[in-house]
Image (cartoon, coloured by chain):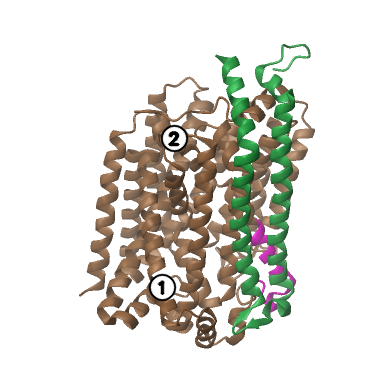
Amino acid sequence: MTTRHHESTIYEQIQESPRFQELRRKFRSWTFPMTVAFLAWYLLYVVLSGFARDFMSAKLFGNINVALIFGLLQFVSTFLIAWAYSRHAAKKLDPIADELRHEVEEKNS
Amino acid sequence: MNQQVLSITLFVLFVAATIGITYWASKNTRTAADYYAGGRSFSGVQNGLAIGGDYMSAASFLGIAGLIALYGYDGFLYSIGFLVAWLVALLLVAELMRNSGKFTMADVLAFRMSPLPVRTAAGVSTITVSIFYLLAQMVGAGALVGLLFGIQGEAAKAGTIVVVGLLMIVYVVFGGMKGTTWVQIVKAVLLMGGAGLITLLVLARYGFNLSALMGTAAEQSGQGDAFLQPGLRYGTEEQGLAGKLDLISLGLALVLGTAGLPHILIRFYTVPTAKEARKSVNWGIGIIGVFYLLTLVLGFGAAALVGSDVIREENAAGNTAAPQLARAAGELIFGELGGTILLAIIAAVAFATILAVVAGLTLASSSSFAHDLYAHVFKRGQVTERQEMVVARIAAFVIGIASIGLGILAQGLNVAFLVALAFAVAASGNLPAILYSLFWKRFNTAGAVSAIYGGLASAVLLVIFSPVGSGKPTSLFPNADFAWFPLENPGIVSIPLGFLCGYLGTILSKESNSTKFAEIEVRSLTGAGAEKATTH
């Protein structure tokens, strides 16, 4: 268990390193706000479906109404966010993660 | 040609193929990592298909198509939560779990906690959630057999549950994760193919004009424009404010539950790296998203070509909408023989769907029993891999037999609510524990245990004391009335409560382990020290 004066482990050293802080910042500053955003966007859709039925029922063209378009936009946003996250992860997160993993594995061996 | 014979023939072919796969998988299952995690050697694409196969249950295939056919837009609304939920898994859970866990959800939760209480709680929750889900599928299988294969009577229903249960036991006990994953891959391909084919036929019938299809559906449903708008099923105007809050409550459980479902979480362990886990969720999102778009067409197509009243006559919940549509669409384009063949295909696919899902659930619950409860709680970690695998197989057998028994006993009960309840428990208990474990330094044993039991108990108790439990003709106990909670879905209360329990449990206990948090944080984000794929 934790003692006040212990030799810091390899994981603690890495955790305190600026490179890891950068990785964590780049991970959290993308995924946390995005999670809030897509949950809010989904809840907006559900709340409007419950409480703004006149708005949702408005016909845009033919039999296609706001509700259908709004629902389909949830699909579009889900696909786009998944794609954007993978791009962000591959470009910004994976290189740092790979570098730090090698560092840990070297020190551990 | 006789449709029943053809359906059963196709189903037997599917069973023969999957038993063959299971035999092959059993030859290649030597270590615990093989049994629990398929040797971590599935590719991202394979696991993505398996994710689809695990997730697209009969409830979503037959259930959502039926909901849309009977209630129009609201069925579509229901499916969207199931899809958006995968973003929680992709952004916050899949890769980090893959990097820091081993076989079960509890591996991540117990990482920096006192293992006995946390593994016990996670095991209890995993088994509870999986059994709820499993029971709903088993009872559903019994109810479908008459409609799909034309065999009537209580004995036929019970017989079907026994057959489904025994096959599922064979897949899991002998095939482990390898066999189960392949069953799910095959099923996903068949289901997408079947649903895609009927969708194409329906769209062709309406000149690929969605607006024309929806117009006819609205007309044939007898509901007019209301059929294309929210409000026929969830939060109807007669139900007032409670109904609308119930809709939001359901939406919350759907969107937050997926990333806490144990049988989904263990899928992330079947790939070699976090990058493959990411890829598999992306494939899963693509497949599941396209599938729900297909069910939109299937549902409206069933309303338009079969008619809501005809569907309701066959099955009050609309579960036969997709098979009925298959026959109608086939007849329309290829004549009577075409209708027979398409119906037979869809009936067989529906049963393949049930089998793949129940196998995943049995694997998740038996793994958690063997790895969490037996190996780490009862034996305090003093077991060999071989002993643990034997126990896992025995547990799969026992859980399978128990679910056959419960499925037959519950035949007359209205258990459709169990799927939504499984999502609510996963969102209220498991998700807070997982997220706090991965992201909150101060989180500790008391917090994890409080979150899991608090979320689990509040979700289950609120449902028991809701109109689902008693007080209505459709309740579990229709002749009693002890309902005081007005909503059928507990999520809007139980999810915040689960997070709150986890928070309070943590700050009221002094324990915290910053060394171990450093390890899980570094490991989860970098993949250092992650379990490797096995090579044979």
What's the magenta region? B234-252
Q: Position of residue B197 (x, y in %)?
A: 38, 69
Pointer 2 chain:
B
Whether pointer 1 and pointer 2 mark residues with C-beta atoms closer than 8 Å, the reply is no
Q: Quadrant of residue B196?
A: bottom left
Q: Residues within 10 Å of mark 1 (few under 14, many from 20)?
A: some
The residue singled out by tag 2 in the image is B40
Which quarter shows the C terminus of chain B?
Answer: top left
Tell me, yes or no, whether the highlighted magenta stretch contains residue B238. yes
Residue B254 makes an appearance in the image: no
Colour seen for chain B = brown
Q: Are marks 1 and 2 on the same chain?
A: yes
Q: Amino acid at mark 1?
A: Leu
Instruction: Answer left or right for B160 relative to B211.
Output: left
Q: Which mark is residue B394?
A: none
Residue in the picture at 34% in, 54% down: B164
Image side of residue B531 versus residue A22, left or right? left
Compared with B530, B7 (above or below) is below
Quadrant location of the N terminus of chain B in the rendered image: bottom left
Which residue in the protein does label 1 denote?
B200
